[in-house]
Image: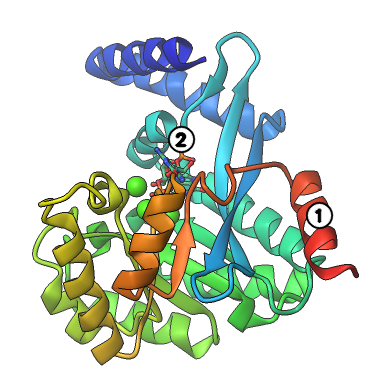
Amino acid sequence: AKADGRGVHRFYREELLHGAQNRKRLEDDLRRALAAGEFRLAYQPVVSTADARIMGYEALVRWDHPQRGAVSPAEFIPVAEECGLIEAIGAWVLDTACAEAATWPDHVRVAVNVSPIQFANPRLPALVAGALAATGLAPHRLELEITEGVFLNEDASSEQMFRALKALGVRLALDDFGTGYSSLGYLRKAPFDKIKIDQSFVRGAIQPGNRNAAIIRAIVSLAETLGMETTAEGVEQQDEIVLIRGLGCSHIQGYVYGRPADAGTVRAQLDAAEGY
Ligand code: C2E
Ligand code: CA
Ligand code: CA
Ligand code: CA
């Protein structure tokens, strides 16, 4: 499936290079996929560092292409962003994730990735409000994950967007922290509830002499000062849990606690944890 993924990626890159006609084909393929119900969501647990309780799940979109098999979001999301279809896909993700989360126990949140393109659309708050109203999900149970990409064309409208989203009562997380541009200025201005420390910092952090642990510690300290939670992403091994706990991150996400899984698997996980 991995080789397939790369093949699709190459396929798309080439098509994108070959002008408007091919681009239109790609867009049609994505639009067809949306109408045909080829997208689905996988949910990955986010766990409390202190007691290993499941605090929530991140919703991650999947595409089961009829000919090409599973296509990674890392490959098709950028294409969807370029052709504008991320708006429709993002709206579907939001509705589906909220509907699913509304069936979970009250303390379990859902995190949804929001593309910078969606973030630039003044209709986003209404879209989010609509998803909450339609599903009955309490706003504080929805966390929107935003990357530093939203700050690229920074102007008054992004500040307004942050205010409008916070006014809905939803939570905001800064995703992939540390991988983008100078992030510190954004932290000062934007009302994030959580910083997600990119998995590239977790990678190798347990090796002696590796600097990543020091960087994670500094990020956690900064976040605590600002009253924000922290999630360490991409935690794969037991040793890393111990390290991350020692560094003070409030949450852990990664294969060590669970790979992204379908809604039915999540339901079984929650049943086992809660006995409800
Ligand atoms: P992300 O938001 O940083 O999501 C985390 C990615 O890390 C996911 O990849 C997840 O499967 C992977 N991951 C989680 N734990 C581990 C681990 O322990 N080890 C390793 N090696 N990887 C781990 P995925 O699902 O392939 O998604 C890739 C990216 O695609 C996401 O990165 C996000 O940027 C984007 N994406 C996914 N779903 C959506 C969506 O609904 N909307 C938007 N706009 N973007 C999405
Ligand atoms: Ca994310
Ligand atoms: Ca991330
Ligand atoms: Ca990422």
State the SS at label 2.
helix
**Looking at the picture, how far across and down is residue 228, in whole percent?**
35, 83
Q: In the figure, 81 relative to 216: above or below? A: above
| x 17%, y 69%: residue | 154
Residue 186 in the figure: left or right of residue 81: left
CA–CA distance in space, label 2 to label 1 = 23 Å
- The quadrant of the rendering that contains the C terminus is bottom right
The amino acid type of the residue labelled 1 equals Arg
Q: Residues within 10 Å of mark 2 (few under 14, many from 20)?
A: some
Q: Is residue 239 left or right of residue 136?
A: left
**x then y, percent, for residue 31:** 57, 31
| Residue at the image point whose x is 32% and y is 83% from the top | 160
Q: Residue at x 26, y 17 (%)?
A: 19
User: How many marks can you see?
Assistant: 2
Q: Name the residue under label 2.
A: 73
Ligand 1 contact, mark 2 (Cβ < 8 Å): yes
Secondary structure beneath disc 1? helix
The structure residue drawn at horizontal position 20% and vertical position 82%, both measured from the top left corner, is 222
Q: Can residue 123 be seen in this view?
A: no
Q: Write down the quadrant of residue 52 in the picture.
A: bottom right
- Identify the image quadrant of residue 120: bottom left
| Residue 95 seen in the current view | yes
Which is more foreground, mark 2 or mark 1?
1
Vertical side of 119 occupied by 159: above or below: below
Farthest right residue in view: 276
Residue 248 at x, y percent in the picture:
34, 76
Q: Identify whether 11 is placed above or below 70.
A: above
| Mark 1 lies on residue | 267
Return the disc, 2 or 1, that comes first in the chain's sequence.
2
Q: Which amino acid does label 2 sit on?
A: Pro
Q: Position of residue 109 (x, y in %)?
A: 63, 71
